Image: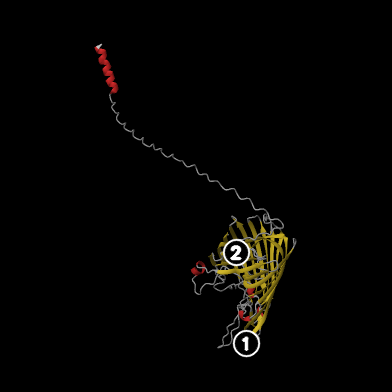
Amino acid sequence: MKKLLIACLLVGGAAHAQPTPEPAPTPAPAPAPVVTPAPVVVPAPVVITEPAPAPPPPAPKPEDPVPVVGKWSPQLYGFMQLLSIWDSTQSFTEQAGNGAIAKDGTYAGDRGRSQISARHSRVGFKLKAPEYDGIKTSAQVEFDFFGNQPPGASEASFYSNATPRLRHYFMKMESSTVDLLFGQTWQLFGWQGFAHPSTVEIQGVPGQPYGRVQQMRASKTIKSDAWALDLAAAASRPANRNSVVPDFEAGVRFTAPKWTAWRTAGATGQSLDAGGLGVSGIVRQLRVVDFANAAQNDHATGWGVSIDALVPVIGATKEKHAGALTLTGSFVLGQGIADQFSGLSGGATFPAPMAPATYTPDIDNGLVTFDTTGALTAIKWQSIIAGAQWYASSKAWLSVNYSQMSSSNIGSLGLAPGKVFSSSRWADANVFYDVTPAMRVGAEYEYFMQHYEDGAEPVNHRLQLTALYIF
């Protein structure tokens, strides 16, 4: 019983006792932030895609205007040439032209000459402007290296330090009404370029009307599908500036566009051209200081007529010209026109006055001179040249040419007979081969002969080899 009472007291005291406060819980540390690594971006492979070609512009409808081309069209052209030449006399440099042949029995006439030259190489530039208001304009500049050398130049300088020379420099305007040309280019006389022969020899060859002159030319072409008629007239630089008035040239030419000839002009100018016939003429005033009185002047009239032909005996097309046979020819008659042929004077000069008087002519030799009566006389010349070109294939062809010239009055003007020739003969044979479209080689034999008024007839034989790179 006593034990039960003690247990109850212990239980009651515990129930009334104050509870002991629990210590404040320590706050849990904030969790460390989780850093997520940035994902590694692998670049996708670059794929270059060609843009789809733009569709071609639609063809203009008949009622739509044709747009004008808005770009200039420059063109570089020319050729590099090496000539290897052997002559039986010492008469000529690279271009023989109509120069005098050294006579037999003289130092130059009894000895030969060899030359290797690149001076005939040529560079040209053509330019076409955009058409404007129905008018087409163009220009051309071309030069080689046959310019005049300074006096006393060494032989090494003559060949290696060649001087540029302008051949063509002109501007042209074409319209539906008329075509106009201003500048230096081929003489209209002889319709030059139309009937030039195929030859390794540097043009112009003996008997060939050949030359370029400063001029103002107007021309018009009237044509149909079967024929074309070219009409042209030009005022050109006079033979001597003291003649006051310019030379006047005019011509008419008939061609048949469907009658085509494959031909080579010179050694490089290969083209497909319409065959036909041209007639042209020149009239000029030749005025010089009087022989006896320098305060006065004398004058003579120069004139000439040229008939020129290009004949496709066996025709050709641009794609097929193997087997083609083409003839070229020119006939010239006139007086006071020696400058229409390369280097022609016939040996004619002006007479020397009695000492102590002097006379300085204001005109080039070969056009006029004073005869035995003191009258100013124009020197007459007649020439004919004919050539044939036969194309064995598209790469190889043969050509032959023949010319002769004569003067009916040069021997009667009182000039020294041993220095004046009144006629000449020339012939050649050529073979050409195109190794590639740009590389051409050729070989030639030539025969030159002249008849002097003292009866001498010197001859020069020439052999030539050439290599050309045409661009």
Residue 251 or residue 392, whichever sits in front = 251
Crowding at dot 2, Cα within 10 Å, few <14 / some 14-19 / many 20+, comes out as: some
Specify the amino acid type for callout 2.
Lys
Evaluate if marks 1 and 2 touch, with contact meaning CB atoms under 8 Å apart: no
Q: Is residue 211 visible?
A: no
Specify the amino acid type for callout 1.
Gln
Q: Quadrant of the C terminus?
A: bottom right
* Residue 341's disc number: none
Q: Residue at x 25, y 13 (%)?
A: 3
Position above or below: 246 against 170? below
Crowding at dot 1, Cα within 10 Å, few <14 / some 14-19 / many 20+, comes out as: few
Q: Is residue 418 left or right of residue 1?
A: right
Q: Is residue 17 visible?
A: yes
Looking at this view, name the residue that lies furthest to the left: 2
Residue 328 or residue 139, whichever sits in front = 139
* Residue 296's disc number: 1
Q: Position of residue 164 (x, y in %)?
A: 54, 68
| Snapshot quadrant of residue 167 | bottom right
Label 1 to label 2: alpha-carbon separation? 46 Å
* Residue 126's disc number: 2
Q: Residue at x 56, y 74 (%)?
A: 106
Mark in front: 1 vs 2: 2
- Badge 1 marks a residue whose secondary structure is loop
| Snapshot quadrant of residue 427 | bottom right
Residue 328 or residue 298, whichever sits in front = 298
